[in-house]
Image (cartoon, grey):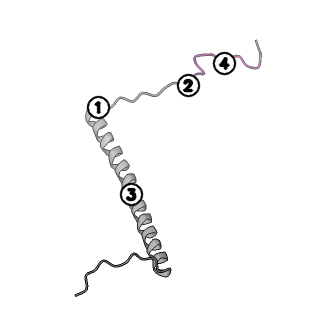
Amino acid sequence: MNPYFPFELTSRFLQPTTRVVVVSDSDYKDYQAKQAEKELLVLTSKKNRYETAIADIDNEIKEIQTAHGLLPPSTEVPN
């Protein structure tokens, strides 16, 4: 045995322990609701960013089509 290390590496005192928290059902439901609200906020923000990106791409497509005369013919009926 090594005199500089008096404990074995497999000692149960050196192993990490898991933390257990006990909460009431109502507190757990509140926690779940708060987590759901956070997730909805993240997803809504992500959706808004994608919609903005789509609008930007649509505008860029229209600009290129307009600049190069590539717009599809108009289907309006003359008066």
Under mark 1, the amino acid is: Ser
- The C terminus appears in which quarter of the rendering? bottom left
Q: Residue at x 50, y 80 (%)?
A: 68
Indicate which disc, 4 or 2, sits on the residue closer to the N terminus. Answer: 4
* Residue 67 relative to residue 10: left or right: left
Per the rendering, the mark at residue 16 is 2
Per the rendering, the mark at residue 47 is 3
Residue that sits furthest to the left in the current view: 79
Q: How far is the residue under mark 3 from the one under mark 4? A: 50 Å
* Residue 72 relative to residue 4: left or right: left
**Element under label 3?**
helix
Contact between labelled residues 1 and 4, with CB atoms less than 8 Å apart: no
**Element under label 4?**
loop
* Residue 54 relative to residue 29: left or right: right
Under mark 4, the amino acid is: Leu
Q: Residue at x 42, y 64 (%)?
A: 54
| Nearer the camera: disc 2 or disc 3 | 3
Q: Which residues are magenta?
A: 4-15
Most common SS among magenta residues: loop
Query: Residue 43 at what x, y percent from top left?
Result: 38, 52
Q: Is residue 58 magenta?
A: no
Q: How far is the residue under mark 1 from the one under mark 3? A: 34 Å
Q: How far is the residue under mark 2 from the one under mark 1? A: 26 Å
What residue did someone put label 4 on? 9
What residue did someone put label 1 on? 24
